[in-house]
């Protein structure tokens, strides 16, 4: 081998490999016209799921491309808050229908449904813990609990009355829900008062000390470590709070706004991004009204 070629090959072999640039993920996801999104969930994998207030359909989007389609045709009643688990099950809050259902994200089939309330209700949001799915009701001072044991779904839901500091009033009450940082309780935001509360599994509530701050129009919640993201829908804002270990005290450290926000309602994460559907509550809904979801850095 010529000396020059040998030296060139040696230099190439010793040079650091060039990193392959990761493709840039889309920063907006177009949803079907007239869809009226409210809830969002991410995973398993690089997928997001959106629920329709119009007819309850579930739309799945590939976060790598922004493209998607309806994977579960709705029952004609709302889909509100959503959460997905690693088994490919999507837990759906049913809003004014007072129900919840679990959907297979691969087939769109409804695995189970539960009528949670007999009278007026607004089953608004849901969170998954290690042993249960918990649903809020913005009309009635209760949480609904679905005990989960592995792949088994329960025959019926448990009704857990809320007591203590969280007192229901006129308008939307308990809305977004997240686990407390210690994993032993829950966090719930009350939309009409802006209060944030820790909820014990027994239903006893305690106001979280936010040092004079409130979260008016509080909607979806997302906990990452001890950082809580709280969507304030009609304020087009996401409040970012740092909590103590048990979630009884916290401070608003910043607020995120974006010119693309148009009444975002809920929030889910993928990588270092937050995804928020624009519900556009201040825009009259029609079958042709455009809707989307936007991504921001967390």
Image (tube, rainbow, N blue to C red):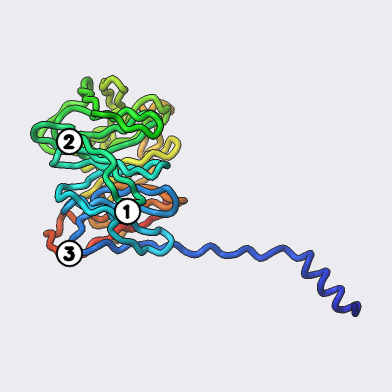
- Left or right? Give the position of 241 relative to 11: left
Sooner in the amino-acid sequence: mark 2 or mark 3: 2
Q: Position of residue 145 (x, y in %)?
A: 27, 28
Q: Which of the 4 image quarters holds residue 138?
A: top left
Pointers 1 and 3 in contact (CB under 8 A)?
Answer: no
Q: From the viewer's perspective, is residue 273 above or below residue 240?
A: below
* Residue 70 image point, x, y percent: 28, 58
The picture places residue 253, in percent across and down from the top left corner, at: 39, 41
**Labels 1 & 2 near each other (Cβ < 8 A):** no
Residue 138 position (above or below residue 24): above
Q: Nearer the viewer, mark 1 or mark 2?
A: 2
Q: Which residue is mark 1?
A: 257
Q: Tell whether 46 sits left or right of 238.
A: right
* Element under disc 2: loop
Q: Is residue 211 visible?
A: no
The number of numbered discs placed on residues in the rendered structure image is 3
- Residue at 14 percent of width and 32 percent of height: 117
The answer to which image quadrant residue 9 occupies is bottom right
Q: Earlier in the sequence, mark 1 or mark 3?
A: 1
Write down the residue under mark 2. 138
Q: Nearer the viewer, residue 246 or 107?
A: 107
């Amino acid at each position: 081998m010529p000396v020059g070629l040998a030296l060139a090959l040696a230099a190439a072999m010793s040079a650091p490999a060039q990193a392959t640039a990761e493709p840039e993920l889309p920063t907006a996801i177009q949803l079907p016209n007239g869809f009226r999104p409210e809830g969002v969930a991410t995973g398993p994998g690089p997928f997001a799921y959106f629920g329709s207030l119009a007819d309850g359909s579930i739309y799945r989007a590939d976060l790598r491309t922004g493209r998607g389609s309806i994977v579960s045709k709705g029952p004609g009643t709302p889909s509100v808050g959503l959460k997905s688990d690693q088994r490919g099950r999507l837990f759906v809050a049913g809003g004014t229908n007072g129900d919840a259902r679990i959907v297979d994200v691969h087939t769109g089939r409804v695995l189970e449904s539960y009528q949670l309330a007999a009278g007026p209700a607004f089953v608004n949001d849901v969170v998954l813990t290690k042993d249960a799915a918990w649903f809020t009701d913005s009309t009635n001072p209760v949480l609904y609990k679905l005990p989960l044991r592995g792949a088994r779904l329960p025959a019926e839901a448990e009704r857990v009355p809320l007591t203590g500091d969280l007192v229901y009033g006129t308008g939307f009450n308990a809305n977004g829900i997240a686990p407390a940082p210690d994993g032993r309780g829950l966090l719930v935001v009350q939309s009409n008062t802006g209060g944030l509360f820790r909820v014990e599994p027994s239903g006893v509530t305690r106001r979280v000390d936010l040092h004079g701050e409130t979260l008016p129009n509080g909607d979806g919640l997302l906990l990452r470590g001890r950082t809580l993201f709280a969507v304030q829908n009609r304020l087009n804002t996401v409040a970012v709070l740092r909590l103590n270990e048990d979630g009884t005290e916290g401070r608003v450290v910043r607020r995120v706004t974006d010119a693309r926000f148009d009444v975002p309602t809920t929030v889910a994460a993928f990588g270092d991004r937050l995804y928020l559907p624009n519900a556009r509550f201040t825009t009259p809904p029609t079958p042709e009204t455009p809707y989307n979801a936007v991504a921001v850095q967390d």
